[in-house]
Amino acid sequence: MFNALIAAEEKGPVLVFSLLGLICLSNAVALCFAYGIGSVVIPHLAVHIGLTEISSSVHPYFRLPFKHGIRTDFVALSAFIIAFFCVKAKGKIQATSSFIRLIHKIQAIIVTFLKKAFLPILPLYVLGFMLKMSSEGTLTFLYTEYLTIFALNVVVSFCYVLAFYKLVSIGYKPLKTLILNMLPAGITGFSTMSGAVTMPVTLECTENNVKHPTLARMVIPTASNMHMLGDDITITLTALTLIMVSGAPLPSFTEFLPYIVGFCIAKLACVGIAGASLLVVLPVLKEHLGFSSEMVSLITTLYVLHDPFGTFHNVMGNGAFALFVEKIFTKAKLVGVKKIKNSRKPS
């Protein structure tokens, strides 16, 4: 984000606040879409989900004593502030240019590490995760009690993301080209279950689609943590299902609006790792949809089962969102017809 803001120079603050507004708007539209589909379809589905006891029979041999580091929202705010001062000091303080070059080198090192060292070992993590789920009985639970809603989540998320790509492809590139360019990132997201870990691949694929690569370098890191269309739809449809099977009536749209507002605000403090979306939204589910502790426990299990598909749609959706932001910013003249400065791809 620092490098993107430096490239955008004086327009950086406007771009950031406009981007956050568009993220909230996109999340809100996805939530409304999920509510519309869920309120119509879910009451007609024969769903019988009960609280099941999942045995915790798998334990790690050891635990690494790592603690939570710096919060993502604090890092983003720090990048914004430092970039703002660097833009103002550029040309006035000689050390500023050296500091900017250092940050560029650090970014290149991090991207290389993620792509060459970290991503190749993630299939082992996914295999272990699936074996653990099988041992604890959650896979059986998926196929016996949750399969209908699982299929609904996948189909609705896929259709929504496809429609998003169709919208941004108008007057741009062919729909097939946009999707094929982003597919490697989507497959990586499916295997990693983390939008943040997949971010280098997402950024590279997005740069193949957009006209302003530097703008993509600002959109994708932010969207990977705050803009997750697959999670928006999955959490909402699953929540509506649990409300129905608990015997309570589905909320009206007026009753659903506070959930939309709370959800969008909560996502601004999210991070694109496995399970993070649900964790930040749980208080919203309790406050505005009346979730009990049993319902919270169950939606956590159901969400984990869906996470690979959810991350796939999150990553693919972010590729379309970057194109959408580019179109909006171009019309608003926040980016020019020419590419933003320093638009070469990162090493």
Image (tube, grey):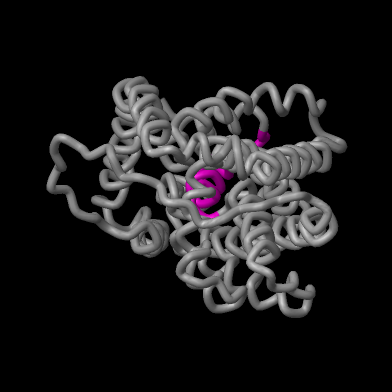
Q: Is residue 46 visible?
A: yes
Q: Nearer the viewer, residue 244 or 240?
A: 244
Residue at x-position 44% and y-position 60%: 279
**Residue 211 is inside the magenta segment:** yes
Q: Which image quarter: residue 289?
A: bottom right
Q: Is residue 22 above or below residue 147?
A: below
* Numbered disc total: 0
The C terminus, quarter of image: top left
Q: Is residue 85 above or below residue 128?
A: below
Residue at 45 percent of width and 59 percent of height = 297
Left or right placement of residue 85 versus residue 65 in this view: right
* Identity of the residue drawn at 74% across and 53% down: 328
**In x, y percent, where is residue 165?**
76, 38
Give the quadrant of residue 122. top left
* Left-right relation of 62 to 52: left
The reply to whether residue 340 is in sight is no
What is the chief secondary structure element of the magenta stretch? helix
Give the camera-side residue of 75 and 131.
131
Q: Picture coordinates of residue 4 (x, y %)?
A: 48, 47
Residue 62 in percent (x, y) is at: 13, 38
Q: Which residues are magenta?
A: 210-226
Against 191, residue 15 (above or below) is below
Left or right: where 139 falls relative to 38 = left
Please determine whether, in this image, residue 126 is positioned above or below residue 167.
above
- Residue 212 is covered by the magenta coloring: yes
x and y percent of residue 11 in the render?
A: 56, 59
Most foreground residue, 62 or 34: 62
**Residue at x 77% of width, y 79% of height:** 254
Toward which corner of the image does residue 153 lie, by quadrant? top right
